[in-house]
Amino acid sequence: MKSIKLQRTESLLKEIVGIALSQLNDTRLSSLNVVDVQCSKGKHNAQVFLSADYDEKEQREILQQLKKANGIIKEYCLEETGWFRCPDFKFIFDNTLEQQNKLESIFQQIKSENDDRQ
């Protein structure tokens, strides 16, 4: 079970990282949606989950750009929070919604096949 303090930190980072991304000059980066943030090792590391609205090639390119913009994002977070240290960000595309939609379509197919048999 996560502590309330850690959950608050994750929620704050989710909001601030989203704002930081929206202020970048690269239109692909500024249009990214932060789905979730999970901190580990206190708040030394943070996995930032992004919506997976892009194909694999675009995702790789975006991740490379995010590595380059990491310093700017960290600086923005430090300014907004007043923290002494900002977590190290690891950006990940979250495809769980996509997988869930695939599962739902599979269940719909199974249901329709069962309905046709009856």
Image (tube, rainbow, N blue to C red):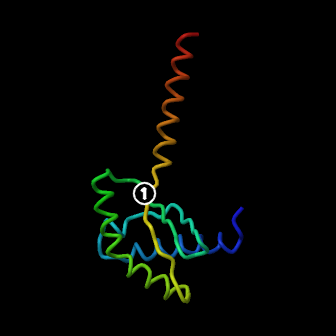
Residue extending farthest front: 41
Left or right: 104, with 29 as reference point: right
Corner quadrant of residue 42: bottom right
Query: Which residue is at 49% across, 82% downward?
Result: 77
Q: Quadrant of the C terminus?
A: top right
Residue 64 spot, x, y in % from top left: 30, 66
Corner quadrant of residue 58: bottom left
Out of 51 and 89, give the one closest to the viewer: 89
Q: Which residue is mark 1?
A: 93
Query: Which residue is at 71% across, 71% downward?
Result: 4
- 87 lies above or below 50: below
Left or right: 7, with 44 as reference point: right
Residue 73 spot, x, y in % from top left: 42, 78
Q: Quadrant of the N terminus?
A: bottom right
**Mark count:** 1
Query: Which residue is at 65% across, 73% downward?
Result: 8
Residue 29 spot, x, y in % from top left: 34, 68
Corner quadrant of residue 81: bottom right
**Amino acid marked by disc 1:** Phe
Find numbered disc 1 in the image and state the secondary structure of the residue it sits on: strand
Left or right: 107, with 93 as reference point: right
Query: Which residue is at 40% across, 73% downward?
Result: 22
Counting other residues with Cα less than 10 Å from the Cα at mark 1, is it few (<14), some (14-19), or many (20 or more)?
many
- 13 lies above or below 104: below
Residue 33 spot, x, y in % from top left: 44, 63
